[in-house]
Amino acid sequence: MTLSTVTRGEVTVVALTGNLMGGPDASALNAALHELVDAGTKHVVLDLAGVQFMNSSGLGLLIGGASLLKAAGGALKIAGASEKILTLIRITRLGSVFETYPTVEDAAASFKK
């Protein structure tokens, strides 16, 4: 998995590519989210358009990221997730934890509401 970040105004977009699973992938995303929070970032969109597969460890990582941002007074929103990943979120009844949007633009705009 690779990740890149770009800040658009008050929103930081973290784009992931590859498979979201445990191990080194988890460490890289976790470290990136902690760095963002430490720098004062409160609005993060996680762009999953480039993610082909996510296992339970990856899902746990998203939950941890959402909790981290919430504790910092912000939010983590998900954009561009495949139908497979959206189904995983629904099956695990985590729809109330994650706000999901079809595009990064939609997710970023939701912070202004």
Image (cartoon, rainbow, N blue to C red):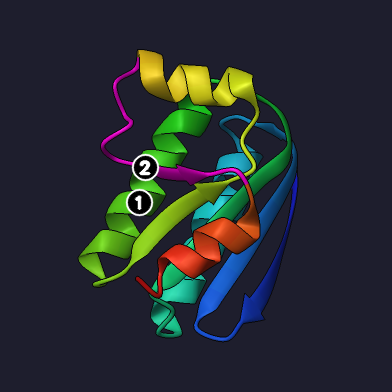
| Residue wearing tag 2 | 98
Residue found at x 43% / y 71%:
43
Q: In this view, does 84 lie above or below 14?
A: above
Q: Which of 77 and 57 is in front in this view?
A: 77
Numbered range of the magenta stretch: 92-102
Please name the amino acid that badge 1 sits on: Ala
Say what secondary structure mark 1 lies in: helix
The label on residue 66 is 1
Main secondary structure of the magenta stretch: loop
Q: How crowded is mark 1: few (under 14 residues within 10 Å), some or many (20 or more)?
A: many
Q: Report whether 71 appears left or right of 12.
A: left
Q: Work out whether 82 lies above or below 65.
A: above
Number of other residues with Cα within 10 Å of mark 2, as a class: few under 14, some 14 to 19, many 20 or more:
some
Residue occupying the point 56% across, 64% down: 32
As drawn, 62 above or below 110:
above
CA separation in Å, label 1 and label 2:
8 Å
Residue placed most toward the observer, 64 or 52: 52
| Circle 2 SS class | loop
Using residue 13 as the reference point, say whether residue 98 is left or right of it.
left
Q: In this view, does 29 lie above or below 85?
A: below
- Asked where in the image residue 94 lies, by quadrant, the reply is top left
Q: In which quarter of the image is the C terminus?
A: bottom left
